[in-house]
Amino acid sequence: MQSFELVSEAFSRQSEIFDKYEEQNEILKWMRSVTRTHVLRHLKNGDEILEINSGTGLDAVFFAGKGFKVHCTDISEGMLKKLRSKINNYNFSRLITWQQLSFTELDKLSGRVFDYLFSNFGGLNCSSDLKSVFIHFKKILKPQSKVTLVIIPPFCPWELALLLKGNFKTAFRRLRKNGVAANIEGVNFQTYYYSVSDVIKALGPDFRIVEVQGLASVSPPPYMINFPRKYPHLYKFLTKLDEKISGSFPFNRFADHFILTAEYNP
């Protein structure tokens, strides 16, 4: 069973450099932009958003800037400290609220219900059992509300291509059934990889899949931070190609991440 205390400690430590690292990473900024565009396609005026794994509040501030109310949850005190600073700096106290809790504790939302639920950049990959998270969704979502989850899948073309270099360990690391040890700021914890089918099964029959979009299928993953600097024209071509084909099979399933949006129809 995952130790969420370790996860909390890891991301609290990372919170000190999180925003700066993303600002310097063109790949991450592009991925976040694509994800936001996806969410905006499905949001309706007046929707109140629940964001789980909200981190330092980069997405919450973006959606608040569009006029949406966002309730942020995260297990990491360090991340929430950065979020609170942003709320004050942007004067968003009426639009952004927060609560420190794990995604396995959504029953502590005190009877609140939301129009939209959002989880970005693989936060849910820290869970060894998605059903233990999704079981709470029905209690906190209104009928016909939507859920957008950004998940890290087992198959990433760029990692599988490492077979050509003989790097079997990295090429097949996502396929390990018991998860993979991650190290963030000196703290080790397990991460788990889920396919689109895994997520659909865990959501259950009350959720209708609306859209599945790949995120970095033919363009490089974010840890290849120097790629856009070394090959700017190639990188621009690959991201543009990604944006055109990301909604089609197999590119909406085999990528660094995928974005899945479902509608709750109890």
Image (tube, rainbow, N blue to C red):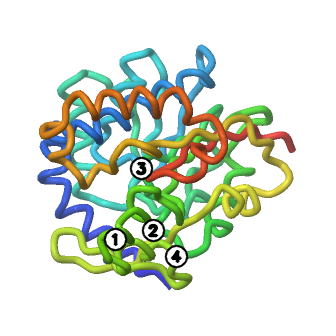
Residue located 20% across and 37% down the image: 228
Q: Residue at x 15, y 46 (%)?
A: 226
Q: Earlier in the sequence, mark 2 or mark 4?
A: 2
Could you tell which of marks 3 and 2 lies nearer the N-terminus?
Answer: 3
Q: Which residue is mark 1?
A: 7
Q: Is residue 217 above or below residue 166?
A: above
In the displayed structure, 149 sits above or below 143; it is below
Residue type indicated by callout 4? Leu
Residue type indicated by callout 1: Val
The amino acid at mark 3 is: Phe
Q: Which residue is mark 4?
A: 175
* Percent x, y of residue 84: 25, 40
Residue mark closest to the camera, 2 vs 4 = 4
Of labels 1 and 4, earlier in sequence is 1
At label 2, which amino acid type do we have?
Cys
Query: Disc 3, disc 2: CB below 8 Å?
Result: no
Q: Earlier in the sequence, mark 1 or mark 2?
A: 1
Q: Which residue is mark 3?
A: 121
Q: Which residue is mark 2?
A: 126
In this image, 160 relative to 61: left or right?
right
Q: Could you tell me how far apart the alpha carbons at marks 1 and 4 are, in whole angstroms?
A: 21 Å
User: Mark 3 or mark 1: which comes first in sequence?
Assistant: 1
Query: Quick check: marks 1 and 2 in contact, CB under 8 Å?
Result: yes
Locate residue 170, reporting x and y percent. Answer: 35, 74
In the figure, residue 12 lies in which quadrant? bottom left
How far, Cα to Cα, is label 4 from label 3? 19 Å
Badge 4, how many Cα within 10 Å: few under 14, some, many 20+?
some
Where does the image place residue 107, in percent across and percent down from the top left?
62, 59
